[in-house]
């Protein structure tokens, strides 16, 4: 292979004047994590609301939950980001549209919101499955004790359901981190974006992508380990995974 | 809100969008699903083969691919494939690979990791008695897999495999990062040429949504039919 390897490239100054190439990649990593964290908060909150709606004994709420999930699941994430970034500001009233376009860090907010809503549909499906997997008697017992629907969800159903779906939620969180790379298309300089610009500036393709790959693997390993601890910590006694 | 939109731009671009763009997207989806299924099944068989090293290699590959973002993998293969081609053919310089071949290789290698997990679950869902009965009948390992295990595994997992193909169909839009003219790429090129981003991206969204919706509706019906037979 006639490729000029140069692993020292990471310690050479980058052309942006922000330190070395390594600093550039690390700043991308930080942005990836920030975007993923905000997106995950949005996904968890809206996803939980929609997931609960799909299990309520109300036809209207069920239908809304179904439509919500289908809407966000049946479009590619890239197209959704374009809708948030290019289309929404044009369809809003002029003042609001201009405000959105002039927002500092517009790609960051767009990416976090777009990925957040995209992932919320998946969280909703998982939570619905989690609540559905509980024995029917739990809801009935809660009602018999005189709990209102809100109390039944808050104190009985959700604490159980979230524990059950912790493993699939972990992979959805990892998916959120990976999906931030799609935001490269709206100009967000996250880890993949920084690796790409490092490749364009330095022509060291494989070093740049190897570094990005290693960083993604590290993040993955950290998240998986942390979630395993969390799983053990919140495990319910008496269940297979319990203490 | 929609007052100054020009939806005629979509009508004028239709032939380009569908004959160039959608043809690329659908061909890529179909071939990548097929290739991914073949490689994925091979990976699943490696993991379940009982040979420690083979299983470990397949496991590492699957975990590795599944922890990377698809966009990064697309970039990797885009730059790597010419060098691999040079190494395979023994040429003196990196060979040029077309956009289609490059993205097809990427998606086959990437999707194989996901398909292999589905096929592994499918193979494990077959009861132990079946391969035992097959070897009692004198079938070799290859024959057992070919005639007994894989057809059933494939059939049981068909809804999941199609669902994964719908995800793949949506994911092919990411070749946008290489400026390839798939459906979204075509829409985006027209959008930028005519300055009609809103119309074109809305139309692209509607088309993706309709196709995915119809396909997932089909999966639900298929699932219901399969569930009755079992």
Image (spheres, rainbow, N blue to C red):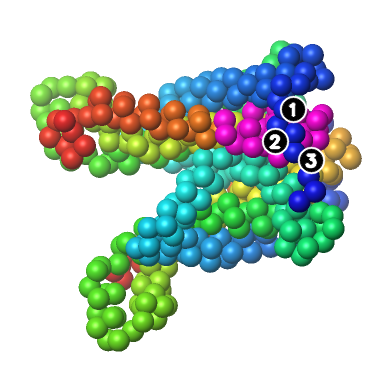
The verdict on a common chain for dots 3 and 1 is yes
Q: Which residue is mark 3?
A: A4
The verdict on a common chain for dots 1 and 2 is yes
Cα distance between the residues tagged 1 and 2: 8 Å
Nearer to me, B11 or B92? B92
Would you place residue B162 above or below residue A171 in this image? Answer: below
Q: Position of residue B222 (x, y in %)?
A: 42, 64
Secondary-structure class at tag 1: helix
Q: Which residues are magenta?
A: A189-215
Q: Earlier in the sequence, mark 3 or mark 1?
A: 3
**Disc 3 and disc 1 in contact, CB within 8 angstroms:** no
Residue in view at x 33 percent, y 84 percent? B139
Q: Which residue is mark 1?
A: A9
Q: Which residue is mark 2?
A: A207
Would you place residue B19 above or below residue B167 in this image? Answer: below
Quadrant hosting residue B204: top right
**Disc 1 and disc 2 in contact, CB within 8 angstroms:** yes
Cα distance between the residues tagged 3 and 2: 10 Å
Image position of A115 (left or right of A48): right
The reply to whether the magenta stretch includes residue A201 is yes
């Amino acid at each position: 292979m006639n490729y000029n390897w140069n692993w020292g490239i990471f310690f050479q100054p980058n052309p942006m004047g922000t330190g070395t190439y390594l600093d550039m990649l690390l700043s991308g990593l930080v942005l990836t994590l920030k975007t993923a964290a905000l997106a995950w908060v949005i996904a968890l909150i809206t996803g939980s609301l929609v997931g609960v709606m799909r299990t309520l004994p109300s036809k209207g709420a069920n239908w809304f939950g179904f439509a919500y999930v289908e809407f966000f699941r049946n479009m590619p994430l890239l197209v959704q980001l374009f809708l948030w970034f290019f289309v929404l500001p044009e369809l809003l009233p002029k003042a609001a549209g201009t405000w959105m376009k002039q927002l500092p860090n517009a790609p960051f907010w767009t990416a976090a919101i777009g990925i957040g809503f995209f992932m919320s549909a998946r969280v909703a499906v998982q939570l619905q499955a989690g609540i559905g997997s509980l024995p029917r008697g739990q809801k009935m017992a809660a009602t018999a004790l005189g709990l209102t629907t809100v109390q039944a969800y808050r104190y009985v159903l959700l604490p159980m359901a979230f524990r059950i779906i912790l493993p699939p939620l972990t992979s959805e969180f990892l998916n959120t981190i990976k999906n931030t790379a799609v935001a490269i298309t709206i100009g967000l300089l996250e880890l993949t974006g920084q690796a790409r610009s490092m490749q364009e500036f330095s022509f060291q393709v494989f070093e740049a992508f190897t570094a990005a790959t290693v960083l993604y693997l590290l993040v993955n390993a950290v998240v998986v380990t942390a979630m395993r601890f969390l799983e053990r910590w919140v495990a319910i006694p008496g269940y297979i995974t319990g203490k | 809100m929609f007052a100054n939109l020009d939806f005629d731009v979509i009508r004028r671009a239709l032939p380009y969008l569908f004959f160039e763009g959608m043809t690329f997207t659908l061909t890529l989806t179909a071939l990548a699903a097929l290739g991914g299924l073949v490689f994925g099944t091979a990976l699943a068989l490696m993991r379940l083969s009982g040979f420690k090293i083979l299983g470990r290699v397949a496991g590492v590959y699957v975990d590795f691919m599944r922890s990377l973002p698809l966009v990064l993998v697309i970039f990797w293969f885009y730059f790597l494939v010419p060098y691999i081609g040079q190494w395979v053919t023994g040429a003196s310089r990196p060979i040029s690979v077309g956009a289609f071949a490059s993205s097809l290789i990427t998606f086959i290698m990437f999707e194989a990791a996901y398909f292999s997990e589905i096929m592994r679950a499918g193979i494990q869902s077959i009861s132990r008695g079946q391969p035992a009965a097959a070897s009692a009948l004198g079938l070799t390992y290859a024959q057992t897999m070919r005639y007994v295990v894989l057809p059933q595994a494939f059939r049981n997992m068909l809804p999941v495999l199609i669902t994964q193909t719908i995800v793949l169909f949506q994911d092919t839009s990411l070749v946008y990062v290489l400026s390839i003219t798939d459906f979204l790429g075509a829409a985006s090129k027209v959008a930028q040429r005519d300055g009609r981003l809103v119309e074109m991206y809305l139309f692209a969204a509607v088309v993706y949504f309709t196709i995915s919706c119809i396909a997932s509706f089909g999966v639900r019906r298929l699932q219901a039919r399969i569930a009755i037979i079992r």
